[in-house]
Amino acid sequence: MAYPHQVVPAPPVRCARASGLRWALTALILGALAPAAAAEQPADPGAGEPGLSQECRVPGAQLYTMAKLGAVRSALGENRPLKILAIGGSAAPGASASYPAKLEAALEKALPKTDVTIDHRGLPGEIASGAAERLRTMVAEAEPDLVVWQVGTHDAIARVDADAFASALSEAVAWIRSHGIDVVLVDPIYTASMAADVDYNRIVDAVRTVAGQQQVPLVRRYEALHYLSSRSDKGEGHMLGRQFRLNDLGLRCMAEHVALTIATSLMRTEAEPEPKVAPAGPPLTAPQRAPG
Amino acid sequence: MRDPNAIDFWRGFALVTIFINHVPGNTFERYTYSQYGISDAAELFVFLAGWSIGIATRGRDGKPEPAGRSVVRLLARTVEVYRAQLTVMLLALALIAGSALLLDNPLILEWHNAGGFFADPIQSVCGMALMTYQLGFFNILPLYVVLIGIAPIFVLVGRFSLIASLALSGGLYLASLVFEWNVPSWPGEGDWFFDPFCWQVLLVLGFVLQGWHLRSDTLRRWSRRLIPAGLAIVILGIVLAVTGIRPDPLMVPEPRLLFTFEKTYLTPARLLHFLGVLLAFAPLYAILAPRIGPVGGYLNRLGRNSLAVFSMGSILSLIGQLVRFQTGGGVLVDMLVAGSGLVGLGFTAWFVEWRTRIKSSRPRP
C-alpha cells in the first residue's frame, strides 16, 4: 500500500486521484449498465489500482465502493491508536502472512504515524439466525473504532433467504453504527462453481445493497476475484486446480484490498466536510447484478 | 440397559433438538423450542449431564460410592469424551475438505471456521489436540470434556456438603461473569464459544439438585409449587424471543454480562429462563410417557447412548448441511435430511447397545 507516498507530497497527484475517485463512482454506476466499460477507463489503463502488489491489482471500480469513516477519522485526529475488529475469514496459507498481520502492516503503511491494533475473530453461523447476536458481543468486548466484516459466506452456505439475510445484516450494521463505530463490509468470494448459482449471487447482491443503504464502504471481493480469475489464466498451477489457486490468491490479497478501501474512504472523509451530507457515498440502493 | 426414565427421555429430546438446530436454515428449525425462548437445548443437555453424574456416583438410597471410584469413573468418562471430540473433529474436517475437492469449490473450506485449519495446519493441529481450536457447532464436546474433568472437585466437596459445592460453583460462575473469564481460542484470537467457567454452574446444579431430590421431598414439593412461576418465565421467554427484544450489550451497566442474554457465558437471564423451563416442563414426562409409546422408547434409547448419538449427530448434521447446500435446500430436501438424520441417530443408539450386548455375552476375539 503505497498510496500516501504518491498522494501526500504531490498535490497535483491528489487532484488526479480525486478525479479518479469521481470516475470510480461514475464507473460504478455505469458498470451496472456496461460492465465492459470499466477495463477501458483511461485513468486506470487495465493495470488496476496502483499501490496494490502486482498479483492483486484490480481496477478500483471493481474493488470497492467508498463511504465516510467518521469514527476512524476522529481516532486519527485525536492521535489515538486505531482499534479494528476484523471479523470472519481465515488467514492466508502460511501463518506468518496471516490476514490480520498483513492488514495491520498494510494499514500502518497507508496511514503513517498511526498505531493500528487488530482483533481478529471468527464468526461461524448465520447472520440471519444467531451470529448477529454473537457479533454484538464481540463488538461490546472489543469496543473498536472500525469493524471490518467479511460477511455472507455462512448464510450462503446455509441457503438462508437473501431477504432475511439482508434485513438481519442491515440491522446489525445499523446497530454498530448507532454506537459511533465505523463498518467496512467485505462480500463473499468468487469461485467458478458458484458463479451461476442464483441464491449465491443474491447473497452477494444483498451485501452490496446493505452497504449502499447503510452508507458503509464495501470491499467487493466477489468482483475483484472475478476480475483476477479472468486475468490470471496463466501462471503456476495449483495442485488442487484453478479455483483453489484463485482462492489462495484472494486470501493473499484480502489485506491489501481492505487497506486500500479504508484509505480511499478516509481520503474521501477528509475531502468532504462533515455538514455536506447529501452526496455521502454512492447510493447503491438499486442492487447491481454480480456478473457471471 | 436402563429402564425408560425421564432423564434419558429429555436427553434424547435435547439430542434431537440439537441435531435439527445444527442444520441451520432448515424448515424444521422453527419448530424447535430453541426458537421460543432465551435458553436452548444446550442448557438442558449440560444440566442433565450433571444430574447423571449424581445418579452415577450415588446409590438409590443417596449414599455416595467410594470417593476413589467416583474420581476414576469421571476420569474415564473425560477420556471417552475427549476421544469422541478428536474423532468427530477429524471427520468434520475431512468432510469439509473432501466436499471442497469433489465439488471443486473452495468456498466450502470456510465452513464453520475450518479455513483456519487449512491455512495453518501446523498450529491448528496442536490446537485441535488442546481443544483450543474448535469448529462452529463442534464446540459442545470440548466444554463437556472440561466440565467432566473438573467435576470430581464438586463431587468430592459435595460429599461433605452439597451447599458448599453449589456455593463454590456459583462463586466461580459470578466471578467469571464479572471479570469475563473464559478459555482462549488458539490459533486465532477470541475465546471458547461455551465458557466452561460459567457453564459449570449448570452441571453442578444438576448434580446438587439430584442429591436433594433423593434425600427429601422438599425439592419435589417446591418444584410443584413453583410451576406457575415456571410457566410465567416460559411465556415471558416466548414473548422476548418472538419480538426480538433483548438488552443492548453496549448500553447495559457494568458488569455487562450480568445483564445480557449471551449463550457463551450462560448469563443469568439464560440460567433463569432455563430454570423456568425446567419447572414448567419437568412434570410433563409423567403425563406423556404412557401416551407416546414408540416415540418415548426412541428418545430414551437416544438418551441412554448420548455420547455416541451426539457425536454421530454432529457428523450427520454436517452432511445434512452439505446436502442442503449442494441441492439448494427446499422442503423436500429438508424432510429427507431430517428424516434420515433421525433414523441415523436411532440406528447409532441401537448399534451401540447391540455391540455392548455382544461384547458382554462373548469373549473378545
Image (spheres, coloured by chain):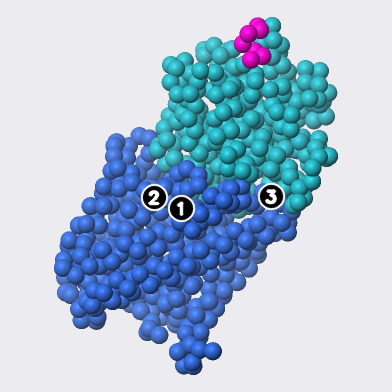
Q: Is residue B330 visible?
A: no
Which one is in front in this view, the residue at disc 2 or the one at disc 3?
2
Q: Is residue B225 above or below residue A217?
A: below
Q: Which colour denotes chain A?
A: cyan
Element carrying mark 1? loop
Chain-order first, disc 3 or disc 1: 3
Q: Amino acid at mark 2?
A: Val
Where residue B106 is drawn, which disc sits there?
Answer: 3
User: Which of the labelled discs sits on residue B132, or is there none?
Assistant: 1
Q: Which residues are magenta?
A: A5-11
Residue B118 appears in view: yes
Q: Is the same chain shared between marks 2 and 3?
A: yes
Gap in angstroms between the C-alphas marked 2 and 1: 8 Å
Decide: is A61 above or below B127: above
Q: Colour of chain B?
A: blue
Label 2 element class: loop
Q: Residues within 10 Å of mark 3 (few under 14, many from 20)?
A: many
Extreme-bottom residue of the structure = B362
> What residue is shown with label 2?
B183
